[in-house]
Amino acid sequence: MIKLIDLLNEGKQVGTLYHFTTLRGATGILTSGKININEDGVISATRDKNLNTAEFDTEGDPDENIVRIDLDGNKISNNYKIQPYSFGHIGKENLEFEEQIITGKEGLPIKYITNIKIMVNNEI
């Protein structure tokens, strides 16, 4: 029998979210202790751990490595709002999509990071 308290204590099951950045950006995240919001006031993430980063903006340095930061979406959803965002669609199919983490100006503390992987030539 399920108890009411068990239902009330269960959080959203978001799963792992992935935040992609440059090696320089990841160094800044670890140094500052947080992932900062972007110009839209959110933190962009995705559920696609194999996101194609071949055309990723490397801030003018084509040799800059991309870093995949794994985030605990379940814990994040207990304290912050996570909302889906689509860049466009054909019919009912999304072309590009992401999850937006709404944190306010303070950003997201690094305590939600579960793993960091450096990508070379679009491969972990």
Image: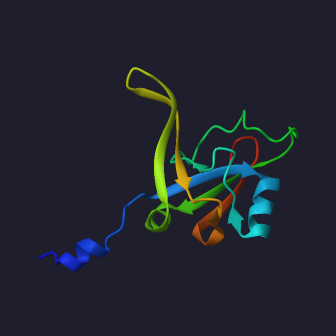
> Residue 59 placed where, x, y %?
83, 41
Closer to the camera in the image, 108 or 122: 108
- In the displayed orientation, state which residue is furthest to the left: 1
Closer to the camera in the image, 93 or 40: 40
- Residue at 54% across / 47% down in the picture? 46
> Residue 89 placed where, x, y %?
47, 25
- Residue at 70% across / 41% down in the picture? 122
Q: Is residue 1 left or right of 75 when viewed as pictured? A: left
Numbered-mark total: 0
Closer to the camera in the image, 8 or 95: 8
Let me know if residue 124 appears in the view.
no
> Residue 121 placed where, x, y %?
75, 41
- In the displayed orientation, state which residue is furthest to the front: 105
- Residue at 72% across / 50% down in the picture? 21
> Residue 40 placed where, x, y %?
64, 44
| Quadrant of the snapshot with the N terminus | bottom left
Q: How is the image coloured?
A: rainbow
Up-down relation of residue 78 to residue 49 (above or below): below
Let me know if residue 8 appears in the view.
yes
Closer to the camera in the image, 118 or 23: 23
- Residue at 72% across / 33% down in the picture? 55
Q: Is residue 81 left or right of 13 when viewed as pictured? A: right
